[in-house]
Amino acid sequence: MQQYCEANREKNDLEEFDLGNALRIVEALARQPHQYKEQIVALLSEKVHDFRYDARKWLQPLMANLAGVMRLHEAIPLLVGNLGHPYSFLADQSMFALAKIGTDDVVAAVCDQFPGASKDFRLWASDLLCKIHLDVTVQRVLDLPTAMIPVPVLRERLKQLGTKVELHMNRTKQGKRAWEIDKARLQAEINGRLLSYDDEARAR
């Protein structure tokens, strides 16, 4: 993989770079005995100040993709750190990897950083959380300050549960638009739906 990326160092966009071939290399590596986890984490942790002339502009996103295919939990903090990265290919592949891993640990790592993170991070993180269909996702999102709650995540989960709770947008005293979320009612509604689903599962 390193040789392939080095050979494509001078290419600067995905139209020039043969991504399909690179992803086939990723799939082949993922099928091998996983003896290089530490190497993947080390490559992801390297700081790149200028991706334009560096082979890691291809290598790091592909290592992120590989970490996702391998469900590499050790890479979660580094992948979360890439959400909202100025280099969108790295941010995109990191989000793919985290969605692929899709565990409670991913949700926790994302939500722990959410309150103090940049707007770009929160946008990418919200998109990611919509893709992780776990009950803990809603629980952690509801623990966030109301003004920061990524409403699309709640909408996605509410749609899955078939709940009728609606989310309204109102204007604050400062004239800004903000979501009005009755956390207690929403939590009760979600818990009720989950309990009814559990009862139906036991009945089957």
Image (spheres, helix red, strand yellow):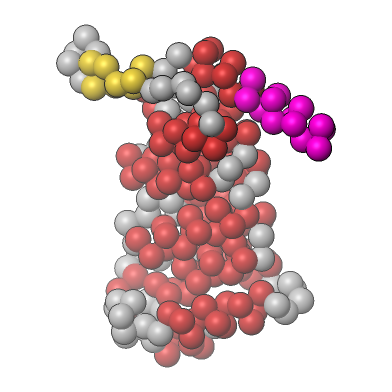
User: Given the current orientation, which residue lies at the most extreme front position?
Assistant: 204
User: Given the current orientation, which residue lies at the most extreme top position?
Assistant: 173
As rendered, which of 50 and 76 lies closer to the eye? 76
Q: Quadrant of residue 87?
A: bottom left
Question: Relative to 29, does residue 171 appear above or below in the rendering?
Answer: above
Residue positioned 42% across, 90% down in the render? 7
Magenta stretch holds residue 185:
no
Q: Position of residue 107 (x, y in %)?
A: 58, 40
Magenta stretch, residue numbers: 192-204
Q: Is residue 108 visible?
A: no
Q: Quadrant of the C terminus?
A: top right
Residue positioned 39% across, 27% down in the render? 148
For this view, does 158 lie left or right of residue 32? left
Question: Relative to 11, does residue 37 appear above or below in the rendering?
Answer: above
Residue positioned 41% across, 18% down in the render? 181
Question: Relative to 164, does residue 59 appear above or below in the rendering?
Answer: below
Q: Quadrant of the N terminus?
A: bottom right
Magenta stretch holds residue 194:
yes
